[in-house]
Amino acid sequence: MKENIIDVLLYLFENYIDTEESQKPDKDTLELELERVGFQELEIHKALEWLENMTVVAERPLNRDASMRVFNDNEVERLDVECRGYLLFLEQVGVLDVETREVVIEQVMALETEEIDLDQLKWVVLMVLFYQPGREVAFAWMEDLVFEDMEAVIH
């Protein structure tokens, strides 16, 4: 089974998002658990590094012009029209602001996948919002969007 960083991140997010800080396992225990459930060591390390970078990004203030976002060639290759449109939609409805949009794009670009699909993008947005201070309402809204889409697929 071909696992990637996003699969590891989704596993961590789904299994540990509601866990109290004092109940979360240490890094070594977490790595062992991830290996036990079948993830490869390289993907585990990359996913944990991605999460560590997320907290660094979240602490850094960003001041960007909100007038227009032009995607560079690498971003266009990784984010198709549907994904770029979804980012614009999230910004227009207030789920993302300029700073969080840029963090999402940076984190997508840090993933080592050739292209990211819309469902994966939604999870990345959800994870980014989770780590951004003061974005609890946006996180709750995005969580509803992600899980409503999942229910629609199941039914």
Image: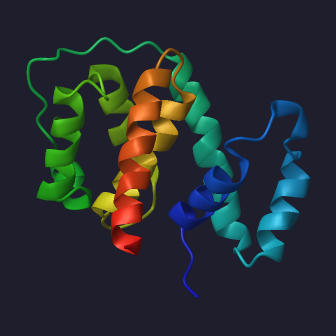
In the rendered view, tell whether residue 36 sits above or below residue 17: below
Judging depth in this view, the residue of 44 and 155 nearest the camera is: 155
Count numbered badges in the picture.
Answer: 0
Residue at 90% over, 56% down: 29
Query: In what quadrant of the picture does the C terminus appear?
Result: bottom left
| Residue 92 percent coordinates (x, y) | 16, 28
Left or right, 153 with respect to 47, comes to left
In the rendered image, the vertical position of residue 106 relative to residue 75, given as above or below:
above
Q: Is residue 69 left or right of residue 18?
A: left
What residue is drawn where x is 21% and y is 53%?
83
Q: Quadrant of residue 104?
A: top left
Q: Position of residue 120 (x, y in %)?
A: 39, 59
Q: Residue at x 33, y 65 (%)?
A: 152
Which of 138/100 is in front?
138
Q: Quadrant of residue 64?
A: top left
Q: Residue furthest bottom?
A: 1
Q: Position of residue 99 (x, y in %)?
A: 34, 21
Q: Is residue 102 left or right of residue 125?
A: left
Residue 30: x %, y % from top left: 83, 56
Residue at 73% x, 79% y is: 38
Residue 109 seen in the current view: no
Q: Is residue 45 above or below residue 124?
A: below
